[in-house]
Amino acid sequence: MTDRYAVFGNPIGHSQSPRIHSLFAAQTGQDISYQAILAEREGFVAAVSAFIAAGEGPARGANVTVPFKEEAFRLATQRTPRAEAAGAVNTLSFDAGAISGDNTDGAGLVRDLKHNLGCDPSGRRILLLGAGGAARGVILPLLLENPAELVIANRTEETAARLALEFARLPGCAIDVKPDGTGFPGLAGRRFDLVINATSAGLSGAVLPLPTFVFAPRCVAYEMVYGRVTPFMQQARAAGARVADGLGMLVEQAAEAFFIWRGVRPHTAPVLAALKERE
Ligand code: ATR
C-alpha cells in the first residue's frame, strides 16, 4: 500500500509541492503519493480528516500553506520547539491517532543560505524585514546560527518591537543574540551583511522605504517570495547586493519535511534546477 501525503492551502492551484515531492520520491525510491488539496477557508480540519479517512493507502502526513498554518498548529497534538516558536505548523505527521506538528520553513531558509548560496548566517549582521507569520517562522532558526546581530524592521514598529522582545526571552533556549525591533526609519545609518525580506510587500509590488546603505558591501539580499522580480530585489541589486529569491527555501523546506516523514534526505540541487528550468 502506498503511503499518502498532501498539501493543504487556499489557493493551492499553483503549488509546486506535488512536483517537488514526486521528484524527491523518484530520486530516493520512496513509494508515496502526494496531492494538492484545496480546503475551504472554514474547512481545514474537515479537509484533513477527510484525507486521513479516505483513500487506498495510509495517510502519513501533510504540508500546510497559507492561510492554514496557525490552524495546523492548533490541530497538532504535539509540536516541535521550532513549531512552538514559529506559532505555526507547515508539516504534519499522522501516526496512530497522534498528529505531530513541525515547522520546516526556517530550516529551509537557513539550508538554502548555507548550502545553496554559500552565505553562512553565523557572525553576520542580519536584517529581517517584516513581523508577520513569514518573519516569525524564521527567527529561531536564524538565532540558532549565531549571527552577530538580528534586527527586525517592520512598517508597524510596535509589532517588530513586540516580536523582538518575545524572542529575546525564549524559555529554555541558550541563545546569545537578542533581536532588536524597529521601524524602517530606525534603520538609518545601519548596515547589514544579510537582508531578508519576509514582508508581503513584493506580492503587491510595493516599494519598501529602505535606506540604500543598509546593504553593506558583499551583502546578500534574500526575497522570500519567488517566481517574480520584486521591488526589493531591484532595490538590493541597484545597491550592489547579491540577490536570491525564495525558490531555494521552498525546495529546502520540502526536503526537510520529506526527511521527517521518510527518514531520507533528498538531494535538492537537481530539483531546484528542474524548477528553475520551468520558471
Ligand atoms: P505573512 O504571513 O506573509 O508574514 P502577514 O502576517 O500578513 O503575512 O504579514 C505581512 C507582513 O508584511 C507584515 O510585516 C506587514 O507589515 P505591517 O505589520 O506593518 O502590516 C508587511 N507588509 C505588507 N505590505 C507592506 C508594505 N506595502 N510595506 C511594508 N510592509 C508591508
Image (cartoon, helix red, strand yellow):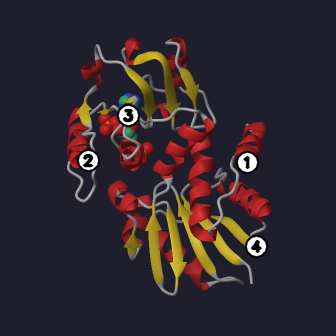
Residue holding disc 1: 271
Residue holding disc 2: 167
What is the distance, in whole Å, between disc 2 and disc 1 at their CAs?
Answer: 34 Å
* Disc 3 C-beta below 8 A from ligand 1: no
Q: Which of the 4 quarters of the picture holds residue 30? A: bottom right
Is residue 28 or residue 3 the one in the foreground? 28
Q: Which residue type carries mark 3?
A: Leu
What is the distance, in whole Å, between disc 4 and disc 3 at their CAs?
Answer: 39 Å
Kindly identify which numbered label has been placed on residue 128: 3
Judged from the image, the secondary structure of the residue bearing numbered disc 3 is strand
What is the distance, in whole Å, between disc 4 and disc 1 at their CAs?
Answer: 18 Å
Q: CB under 8 Å between callouts 4 and 3? A: no
* Residue plotted at (27% across, 52% down): 174
Q: Which residue type carries mark 1?
A: Val
Judged from the image, the secondary structure of the residue bearing numbered disc 1 is helix
Q: Is residue 249 above or below residue 253?
A: above
Q: Is residue 73 above or below residue 107?
A: below
Say whether disc 2 or disc 4 marks the residue closer to the N-terminus: 4
Residue holding disc 4: 31
